Image (cartoon, grey):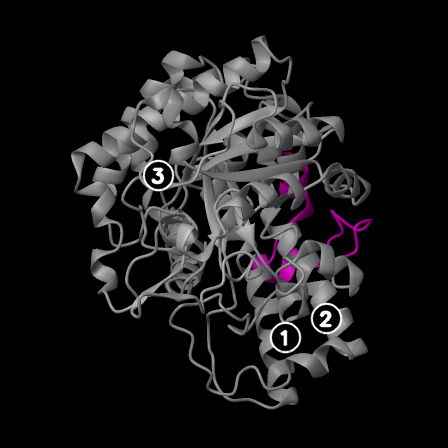
Amino acid sequence: MISWIQVVVVLEFMIGNTGNVMASESVSREMLSIRCGANPWKKAPWFDKLNQQPIRGVNLGGHFVLEPWITPDLLDISTSIDGDKKIVDQYTFSLYCNVTDSCHRMQDHWDKFYVQEDFDLMKEYNLNTVRVPVGYWYFSELSGFPTGPFILPNVSILSPTHPITKVIRMADNAGLQVILDLHGAPGSQNGFDNSGQAANVNQSDADWGTGWLNDTQNVQGTVDTTAAMATYIGHLETVLGIWNVMAIEVLNEPYVNLELAAVHDFYLTAMNALRVKHGNIPIILHDSFRLSEWGSLLDHIPHRHVYMDDHNYFAFMFQKESDLEEDKDLQGLFSRMICNMKPGFHTASCKTAPVLVGEWSLAINNCMERLDARFEDIGQCTHMEDRLESQWWKENVRDFALRQMEVYESGLGWVFWNWKLDSTASLDPSAPYWSFLLAVKHGFIDTKAYGEKKCDFSSVQGGEVEGEREREKENDDEVGTDDNKDGKKKKKKKRE
């Protein structure tokens, strides 16, 4: 989910999408508005399931794929095994938990970390979606791919009491839709700990993800896993009567240095495989940190209801020693920057495929303990505790949150990373910027203000006439959803 690479990601997005895409003479704003309108989320197949709202959700990170900064009580990265061997991720936890007599704690974690009250509170906070990150090993029973050392629940994936099924059912009980997200592939698609198996911190990042993409067995195992996930969703629907999984995300964050054409080929193979198992489940593809490059690559995908996922973090940019006033300047800079991204983000949603921001946060500094394996304290974290007591920060972070929501809702919507952290992680002064639950508690997120307009779109756009806005609104009303082929047939032909 997180690494210093997000510096590249955000800069690429702002420069590539708000610059080159907007400047493209071949795609006029009028044509784009005809294609997807001012609000692409109105045409998504889950539009009615979400009560005709954009996606407004949270991630359940750290539940099925452990991350040391989310659950340090369980995944203690200070634990050394035989000197140089350390527990750093779910892979090494599973390898060495017998030595530390802690294997049983995984089952306790699945049973207790998320409970029905979490999902009921999400609904109370006017959320409508949860994104559930999972690893390939949970579906080995259906895919046939070996699990490796990973600990599995003590019941079948098809059992109504399987931990993943229990989470999906609790979400259903609360009236929430689910995106089932393959977060960890065999061999690790990115070298991040959130894939289940982190790369060595001293390994060149040029090699991250190659243990997955350059290994034909691992790629095929990932394809088989996506098909198994589709089979699982069909089982939920037809056998267990659970119908709230609204999309599959094929793979989270293939690394930025991987050959994009090869990632595209994997996506196409995986989509073909899962469509055999479930003919109409919507599909989400992560952009591999290169959203602006996907336009032509998606032109000939022979499937409907295919969408993009882009992850947007400000926490890894412009880090330097600073005082409180300079911190305020940085907050102001990012608040202006996010609004400047709105036209390009909407354009990307129309030119490429409708875009969901499946991960984002309120952090503007890289300070959360254990989050970044290459973390360097250069003085950027000195005043984190002071901010929590400041009315200025409360108001401006809340404004920053609403601005991000506004921009992301010019696509398909947003899913905040993360819903919550464990008790130890929650004590970190950076925690309220990463935990939706704590952000609400600290007044950083107003759960009744979603959809409020904070960006001065006319100034950001460089002047926009009212008549153009009216034309976009008319196009929204005329085009309807993806399922309504009238008025959209020519534009959707290549996808069908």
Badge 1 marks a residue whose secondary structure is: helix
User: Label 3's element?
Assistant: loop
Q: Quadrant of residue 303?
A: top left
Disc on the earlier residue, 1 or 2: 1
Residue sitting farthest toward the top = 238
- Tell me the amino acid under the disc marked 2: Asn
Q: Is residue 408 magenta?
A: no
Answer with the quarter of the image where residue 242 lies: top right
What is the span of residues highlighted in magenta in the rendered image?
A: 445-471
- Whether residue 422 is visible: yes
Q: Which-is-in-front pick, marks 2 and 3? A: 2
Separation (CA) of disc 1 from disc 2: 8 Å
Pick the quarter of the image with the C terminus. top left
Q: Which residue has dot 1 on it?
A: 332
Helix, strand or loop at disc 2?
A: helix
In contact (CB < 8 Å): disc 1 and disc 2? yes
* Cα distance in 3D space between marks 2 and 3: 35 Å
Of labels 2 and 3, earlier in sequence is 3
Answer left or right for 124 relative to 163: right
Find out whether the residues at labels 2 and 3 contact each other: C-beta distance under 8 Å: no
Q: Say which of 493 and 298 sits in front.
A: 298
Crowd rating for badge 1 (residues with CA inside 10 Å; few <14, some 14–19, many 20+): some
Residue at 37% of width from left, 12% of height from top? 276
Please give the residue where the numbered disc 3 appears in the rendered image: 295
Q: Which residue is mark 2?
A: 396
